[in-house]
Image (spheres, coloured by chain):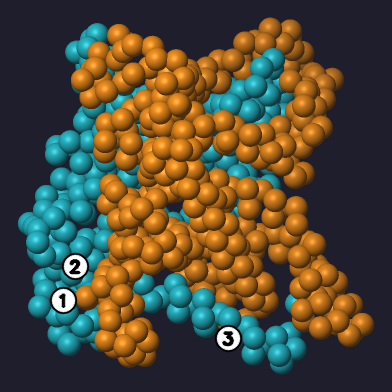
Chain colours: A orange, B cyan
Amino acid sequence: MSHSALDSGPAAAGSTAAVDPEPGKPRAASTPPVRKRRRSFLPYGLILPAAILELLIHIGPMLLGIWIAFISLTQLNLTNWLNAPFVGLQNFINGLNPDSTIGQAFFSTVGRTLGYTILVVGFSWMLGMAGAVFLSSNFKGRALLRTFFLVPYALPAYVGTIAWAFMFNQRDGAVNQILVDTLHLFGDERPFWLLGGNSFGAMVIVNVWQLWPFAFLMLMAALQNVPTDVYEAAAIDGATLWQQFRRITLPMVRPANGVLLMVMSLWTFNQFNVPFVLFGATSPKEATLISPLIYQNSFGSWNFGLGGAMSVLLLIALFIASVFYIRMVLPKGADND
Amino acid sequence: MIETRNFRILRNVVLTILSLWVAVPLFVVVSTSLKPLKDVSGLFQWIPREITASPYLDIWSTVPLAKYFQNSLIITVCATACSVTVAVLAAYAIARLQFKGKRAFSLTVLSTQMFPGILFLLPLYLIFTQIRNMTGLQLQGSYLGLIITYMTFTLPFAIWMLSGYFASIPKELEEASMIDGTGRMGALFRVILPVAKPGIIAVAVYSFISAWGEVLFASVLTNEATKTLSLGLKAYASESDVFWNQLMAASVVVSLPVLIGFILVQKHLVAGLSSGAVK
């Protein structure tokens, strides 16, 4: 965390003293007052375009999103939404009542999405760690293998999913060719992987395939800081490979781990791309995640109020998560303006 | 770790498994893209019985792929260019200057980076509708509308990554330049930007990759004339039969620009991701 964007603050302020005119440089002698006056406006000038855009594409839409949860927005008044009637908490009461089918679907989707996140992030982390540990040692072809491992992450997200959709195809796919026709695992039955209960597992596999290179990349960077003589000393003392991993490697990547797991969890929890390409606009009910559920409610059944109410809950949950995330990313000392 | 014999054996086993795990789907894509349609349906064949380049020729006429390519290119390039330009200025302010409200601004950028597109999609849709009602400007289904929505995810990321880059550049460089009388902006454009060029390119490539693969906004905010590749590829599967071989050939073709870009800037991207985004 040594050179974060924000902790350069106090040092940057101190450095302005160093800019003061040096003796023997008469040209610079007259500049400080001018620069001082300019400096007070310059930062705002620089962030102005970004701030305006943030306001227009993030803050504004987010506030409007909260408003949508409290009005009755239907397909009929969609183009005239400013006049949609205010209905208070009705959308929350209708949609999130745990006794109604819609409410049950919502809460089971939240639970499913959490389980999905744990599985995907867990497997991605383990694969990434395995790749990082073994690619940190020197051998021929290491650089090539590293680039190759990153390919699933660099591909357009939908291309990887399309490849897996074909492999999971019940009749023509490679998965059933191996499991059914070569290994004869299911007798004569050819299971469907993208329908029913199997679809959840299939989606986990696709997502891990796309996400693990990111864990690999970050853990690789973290492991580069581990000095090799620590391992040498441990090996001389008779530490096994597993002990070296437990006692040296794991503690060394711990600082990077917190943020890595947080980022991957948020991406996975918000996942839309994989189910949308794998299943289309409507996921099987066993594999519906929270983002696709909000999408289906808003643009499938045109129930915008319900989608809005769910969005608000998601917003609150993510807001709480983001507080933890920011605490991890921003060092405590950088709290000054 | 120390390279004992056991370590080497374990390394070979693990790296072979990981390589297969990455390679199999890629192999399926490439081999299927070289098969005639009759060999694609029915039992999957790992080794093509017959190799043909015709799927690569047919993809352009089965669906208007060139048009989708053009749409994706226009939208992605514009969103990337706008994000990076705006982000360079803001990131420099965050990394180097002191001002009131800096923390609030940084926190906003950081937290909006984590909110999913689904939270912005419907509100943006309504705002676009209102703009059309009031001014007649049609943003739904237009390039401009998509470019704006794509910036919701490319901009915060670019600001955050670039401020990490700028902070890691030694301050002495621009101090020397300012002593020579260039001023802050002169230092930024003449000293910092050339030094940070690899980082800026890496951020641009990363923005390009994420915008190129976007599906959610495109699924609601495009029409037949502005459809992007991410949705256009679905057209190979719209008939009763799926043209898997052409779909795979098209997948290869649309992946090439981002794959080449990724491999070219890989080194800087890795450095930037590990110093800027995740730390």
Q: Splitting the image into 4 quarters, where does residue B244 fall?
A: bottom left
C-alpha gap between disc 2 and disc 1: 8 Å
Assign a secondary structure to mark 2. Answer: helix
Q: Which residue is mark 3?
A: B13
Q: Which residue is mark 1?
A: B41
Amino acid at pointer 2 = Trp
Near-viewer residue (B22 or A322): A322
* Chain under disc 2: B
A323, above or below A198, in the image:
above
Amino acid at pointer 3 = Val
Q: Are marks 3 and 2 in contact (CB under 8 Å)?
A: no
Question: How many numbered dots are placed on residues in this image?
Answer: 3
- Whichever of callouts 3 and 1 sits on the residue coming sooner in the sequence is 3
Please name the residue shown 17% across and 36% down the image.
Answer: B223
Q: Splitting the image into 4 quarters, where does residue A292 fall?
A: top left
For marks 3 and 1, give the one nearer the viewer.
1
Q: Is residue B57 left or right of residue A179?
A: left
Amino acid at pointer 1 = Ser
Residue B244 shows which numbered tag?
A: 2
Please name the residue shown 75% across and 53% down the image.
Answer: A255
Near-viewer residue (B168 or A304): A304
Q: Quadrant of the N terminus of chain A?
A: top right
A154, above or below B18, in the image:
above
Same chain, labels 2 and 1: yes
Where does residue B145 sit, x and y in percent of width and height? 29, 27
C-alpha gap between disc 3 and disc 1: 34 Å
